[in-house]
Amino acid sequence: MALLKARNIVAGYSKELDILNGVSLDVKEGTMVSIIGPNGAGKSTIFRVLFGLLPAREGTVTFDGQDVTNPSPAELLRLGITFVPQGRHVFPLMTVRENLELGAYIRKDRKGIQKDLERVYDLFPLLRERSKQKGGSLSGGEMQTLEMGRAMLLNPRLMFLDEPSLGLSPIMANEVFDKIEEIRSAGSTMLIVEQNADRSLKMSDYAYVLETGCNKYEGPAEEIRNNEEVKRLYLGG
Amino acid sequence: MFIQLVVSGISIGAIYALVAIGFTLLWQASRTVNFAQGDFLTVSAVLMFILVCLGVPFILALLVTVGISAVLLGYVVKRGIIQPLIDRSHTTIIVATIALSFLASNSISTFWSAQCKPFPQIFGMTPYRFGSIILSRQHVWTIVIAIALILAINLFIQRTKPGKAMQAVAQNREAAKILGINISSVTTMVFVMNAVIVVFAAMLIAPVYMVRFDMGAQLGLKAFYSATIGGFNQIRGALLGGFLVGVIETFTSAYISTEYRELVVLVVLIAVILIRKEGLLGTEER
């Protein structure tokens, strides 16, 4: 059974216009699922709906059998879902360590937090080195790493990653992808939207292609990657 | 003379700084510019005055006023007025706070009194003597109390979990939200903090200004200048701005003329925002 199930999601930013016109998707435990599609297909919007930042007008979402349609972020975090949104979202005037600790804001077990902080430091040694530096002094790639580290402080059962490589140099983007693969191989479940669709599909198990807010194709990532039409339209080849 | 002037400038500046920090905290949490800030101060001073006149011991009067202000000027104002408007433009909230300002000062002058009332000299009258230097008790205690409060506020923001949540909301609301921080309750907490800060500022200024329905208007304005000069979005900016305005005012009064003290402050204000629109220590905002 799928860990996360979204059914027929309809949502939009203004009353007149729906960005999502009935999107459905499943994420199975232990898998990485990609969402690809052209600009304006509603890729980022689906995350905003799933994370309770934008209300769904129609449709349902369940997590582990529990209804989580239009949740509060705190509710999802408690269930073990974390979100790394598009764009840079570090706290620039706080240290790297303080940034990471805020990832565990909803937790109260100090010892457990300390343990998970060490685990994140082990995964991203760079963050340990920079722990006393201000978030705002990091490079774009380092900030992305910090945000992923922060999202891992809850030991999430499911992570949403929205355009992790956006605005990064190719070398930095590569490093970020390597880290994602590392997190992935540690058994985390992930749902990812990524402009570099080819790279994202290579890492993923399953993929959804969205177009104007609807499901267009879905299938094992390898199949989608070799689908002639998807190739022609979204993979630039 | 010089040292006395500096102490007197720092003392009035410390009060400006306190009120300006309130401005800054509200801005950081909710992008609110509270034009009723000065009237919050008047309301607190009037409350304290009434309680003292009723024979309530001063410390108790202070605590009761802190309680009432926290609820009325903090919680109720946030939930009743700011909250419903928070998704509108900044201007809407500003106009609402201006309305609140009129409501507060006019209610006091209509229903209580339009007269000046002398506030008790809570710090005593005999000045401190350090050799040839004579310092007023009012000035010394104002500085001590204001600095203690500012340190406490800072410690709270830097070291405690709610304080860190405040910082998070100020620095990146979206990120704060996705980490499960309840922006609305953090904002409410900040309004309550501001209401408490204002009571202490009222306590420090009332013996100097006397209690009147418009006593806060001037002070609110000065604190607004302070926050703007120092940098509206930074606590250390509000702090620097407050002390600067206090010292500049005091020196202008002493060496030029009392009539020019506001003028000089305004010239400094204009000069600062022409050169650096974020204020001396402010940071640019997106």
Image (cartoon, coloured by chain):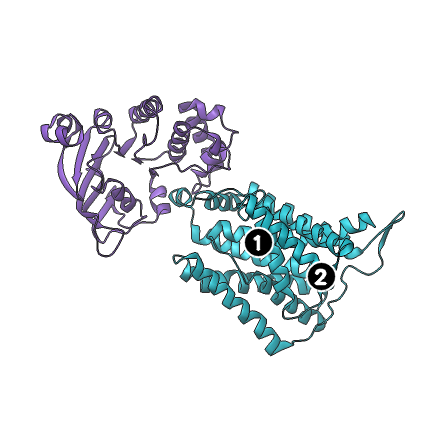
Task: Name the amino acid type tagged 2.
Answer: Glu
Q: In the rendering, which numbered label is found on residue B22?
A: 1
Comparing marks 1 and 2, which lies closer to the viewer?
Answer: 2
Question: Is residue A230 or residue A104 the one in the foreground?
Answer: A230
Disc 1 and disc 2: Cα gap in Å?
28 Å
In the image, is residue B180 above or below residue B208? above
The colour assigned to chain B within the rendered structure: cyan
The spot of residue B282 in percent (x, y) is 54, 43
Report helix, strand or loop for mark 2.
Answer: helix
Q: Are marks 1 and 2 in contact (CB under 8 Å)?
A: no
Task: Name the amino acid type tagged 1.
Answer: Gly
Question: Is residue B112 or residue A81 the one in the foreground?
Answer: B112
In the image, is residue A169 above or below residue B41? above
**Disc 1 residue crowd, few under 14, some 14–19, many 20+, Cα 10 Å:** many
Q: Residue shown at 18%/32% (left/top)? A: A207
The spot of residue A182 in percent (x, y) is 32, 23
Q: Residue shown at 48%/61% (left/top)? A: B94
Residue B189 showing in the rendered view? yes
Q: Which residue is mark 2?
A: B259
Q: Chain of mark 1?
A: B
Report helix, strand or loop for mark 1.
Answer: helix
